[in-house]
Image (tube, rainbow, N blue to C red):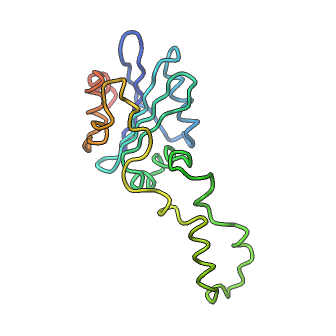
Amino acid sequence: MYFAALLARTEDGWEASDTELDDVETLSDLADLAREAAPEEDTVLVLIEQEDAWFGVVRIDGEEDPRIYVSDAAAAARSSYGEILLTDELLGREPGDDVPDLDALVDLDGTEDGEDEDEEDDDTESGGTSAEAVPHGPVGDASVLDDLGVSEKELKALSADAVTEIAEALGASEVLETVR
């Protein structure tokens, strides 16, 4: 089960809103959605969690690029919402690294089983599979909440109920509960 919420910091404190991610296909879409929730280029946090598997924090400050932290990239990679957060940049790879070489697939004639092992090794080194490209464990900016009272060490140590724990640390647990 997933839960996603937006927390927008305003002059009066944090405002929370439940967010539907069904129409969000890219990180850019998510950032636009978050910016719409902020009355004036205030800080907006998008908190996403999949029960007992992983959580993600996306921070948008005005028009700056989103800052992202994902607690377990491998678990998030198996989730459509997690895939939105796991950009090539976040994973430290060039765009398309885990995409198969389509030109090589065009010339398949059914005799590929007899190819040299050296050629197979070259394919693995050049692209690899998406499972190899996504590390187990946290990725991204672990200091994303430092100035808001959640240190890098605390963020990395959060439990399965991370979204609630983050909201408590921010003083936003009551507003988050209203949308949960």
Would you say residue 39 is visible in this rendering? yes
Residue 1 seen from this side: no
| Residue 32, position as x, y percentages in the image | 57, 29
How many circles with numbers are drawn on the protein?
0
Residue 90 placement (x, y as % from top left): 51, 45
Is 61 rendered above or below residue 117?
A: above
- Residue in front for this viewpoint, 39 or 120: 120
The reply, left or right, for residue 34 in relation to residue 174 is right
Note whether 65 is above or below 97 in the view shown: above
Q: Residue furthest top?
A: 11
Point out residue 79 in the picture as x, y percentages from the top left corner.
44, 52
Left or right: 121 with respect to 175? right
The image position of residue 36, as x and y in percent, is 54, 23
Location of residue 171 by image quarter: top left
Q: Residue at x 38, y 38 (%)?
A: 142
Q: Is residue 98 above or below residue 68?
A: below
Q: Tell me which residue sits at (40%, 44%) in the image.
A: 70
Quadrant location, the C terminus: top left
Quadrant in the rendering for residue 161 = top left
Q: Which residue occupies the foreground of this view, 174 or 44?
A: 44
- Compared across the picture, whether 14 is left or right of 104 comes to left
Q: Is residue 70 above or below residue 115?
A: above
